[in-house]
Image (tube, helix red, strand yellow):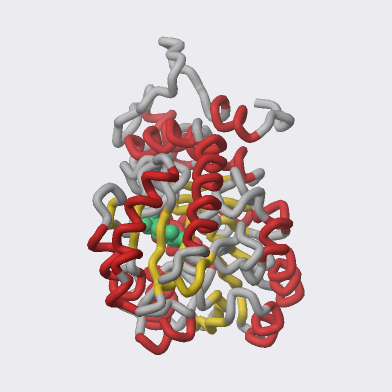
Amino acid sequence: MSDDFELETLALHTGIHRSQFNEHSEALYLTSSFVFDNAAQAAARFSGAEPGNIYSRFTNPTVTAFEERLAALEGAETCVATSSGMSAILACVMGLLSAGDHVVASRSLFGATVSLFNNILRRFDIETTFVSATDVAAWEAAVKPGTKLLFVETPSNPLTEISDIAALAAVAKKAGAWLAVDNCFCSPALQRPLDLGADLVIHSATKYLEGQGRVLGGAVLGKRNLVMEQGVFGFLRTAGPSLSPFNAWVILKGMETLKIRMEAHSANALQIARWLEVQPNVARVHYPGLPSHPQYELAKRQQKTGGGIVSFELKNGKEAAWRVVDSVCMISITANLGDVKSTLTHPATTTHARISQESRDAAGITDGLLRIAVGLEAVKDIEADLARGLSAT
Ligand SMILES: *Cc1c(COP(=O)(O)O)cnc(C)c1O
């Protein structure tokens, strides 16, 4: 595949290695292991002298196709697939950090990511300092001699705060640390963090890459020496949170339509955000495509569109938020996002419920906040579904 192709072309044609049957659509290799011709070949494969598949915890052709395709879309030298977005973050940390290392992370991360850094990794003596997603000076101030990793998610979940990737990359470089960006909300169709100086990109492929809410998957992308040699891949092949070939195949097919889906999600989300802004019971709308968003200018520079996620605060707190949730008939009440079907969540009592009230307040996840991952239904039908609970508040 030529590197000159545009993203939508790469999404359709990268990673295709046809079998002897010359199939047109990508084959699904559902096999846990691979057969060797003889003892010498088995030995050569295990020693690494001969490239090739051994066992699907290490590599599998369908998974490799997914990795090649995502690497092309992100403009990455290499990609390793994982069983989920969380295992991508875990593999990144376990592959690159050691006890005693320090992490600086955004306060506005996906709930499970906060728990991973705050509860689990702390037990292994990896300490994390959480700072504001948008205050570059705070990141710089939090860096100390043992700082190895800066971790950010932009736009953030659920408030869609925008972090300046290029500025954080400069902070990381000066500190001799790596910058990892969770690019789940934008996908490479809207934002390419490696082009802006990030060292690593993390994906939950479960979301927009797959696009139809069917399977879990994840990936770590970056330079070969970081992802392959320094240990992300080594951790995966040893510890085992590898992507299943079936899931890789589903995600591969989903990625074919990534660009047009992201454009359609974004167009719908912008209309919903504008409509929510004029609803009397809505106190505030968070959407990077609205001029009222505090980092609107940065978002315009850094992303192609505002993306598909909108969050909004109701004037009357949790009671009003729950009324909207309980009044929807068409929109799914579920924590997933990135699906062609719209989904609605109350973060304070679901995705962010395990975080202390104190940390939630600090992150701005109020009891009246709702997050809608805007799907591809007609905008007028989404509005009508939200309007019922909104007018009752
Ligand atoms: C969903 C999500 C994750 C975790 O991904 P899983 O595939 O559910 O493990 C990480 N980061 C962000 C921003 C997410 O939305």
Image point (57%, 59%), residue name: 230
Image point (35%, 58%), residue name: 387
Q: Position of residue 333 (x, y in %)?
A: 27, 57
In front: 189, or 31? 189
Q: Quadrant of residue 125?
A: bottom left
Q: Is residue 246 above or below residue 238?
A: above
> Position of 121 compared to 105: left or right?
left
Q: Is residue 57 visible?
A: no
Q: Quadrant of residue 321?
A: bottom left
Q: Position of residue 223 (x, y in %)?
A: 65, 52
Q: Is residue 351 above or below residue 81?
A: below
In front: 191, or 317? 317
Question: Tag count in the figure?
Answer: 0
The quadrant of the rendering that contains the N terminus is: top right
Q: Is residue 215 above or below residue 231?
A: above
Q: Position of residue 162 (x, y in %)?
A: 61, 66
Q: Position of residue 178 (x, y in %)?
A: 64, 67
Image point (45%, 64%), residue name: 279
The quadrant of the rendering that contains the C terminus is: bottom left
Quadrant field for ligand 1:
bottom left
Q: Is residue 256 above or below residue 221?
A: above
Image point (25%, 59%), residue name: 327
